[in-house]
Amino acid sequence: MTDKILVNMTVNGMVCERWIEPRLHLGDFLREELGLKGTHLGCEHGVCGACTVVVDDEIVRSCLTLAVQADGAMVETIEGKSESGALRDLQDAFLERNALQCGFCTAGLLLTADALLQAEPEADRARIRDHISGNYCRCTGYHAVVDAIETVGRQRRSGGRGHRHE
């Protein structure tokens, strides 16, 4: 008899079905079972935000979420959001504002920033800082990150999505 549990979820638009250990964290599932290495595992205590993913339209810490908790859910990772072009404007702004350096925290910051701008398109600098406060970045000092997010928020409100690469 096996102690594994069958989980089904849709990850970046693809239906995934796997037999897994019940204690497997979602971040490990994404990285080890599906090969999605963009979800970084930093502190593994839910503090740094590097493991941020989107589950049923909510940002979650994949190091604190068991994969079995995502059974039946829609999961989006940095790979899926990037490949779809949903983050192109944020990615461009991060690059233009030098808001990324080593890149370890970038995926989590991009997903967190996008969630904020979708929920609160009028977010000001103070709200942006508050919302990303759960995402640690040891390289940038956050000023450039806030600049990039603020710029994209302004672009999205004016009807543009920033720079388009076609």
Image (cartoon, rainbow, N blue to C red):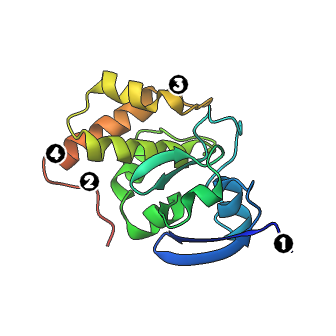
Q: In the rendered view, would you say 67 is above or below 106? A: below
- Tell us which disc is closer to us: 3 or 1: 1
* Residue 152 in view (yes/no): no
Amino acid at pointer 1: Thr
Q: Nearer the viewer, mark 4 or mark 1?
A: 1
* First in sequence: mark 3 vs mark 2: 3
Mark 4 vs 3, N-terminal side: 3
The quadrant holding residue 153 is top left
Q: Which residue is mark 2?
A: 162
Mark 3 and mark 1: Cα distance apart in space: 48 Å
**Mark 1 sits on what residue?**
2
Q: Residues within 10 Å of mark 4 (few under 14, many from 20)?
A: few
- Callout 1 crowding tier (Cα within 10 Å): few <14, some 14–19, many ≥20: few
Give how far apart the Cα atoms at labels 4 and 1 are. 52 Å
The residue identified by callout 4 is 157
**Res 159 seen here:** yes
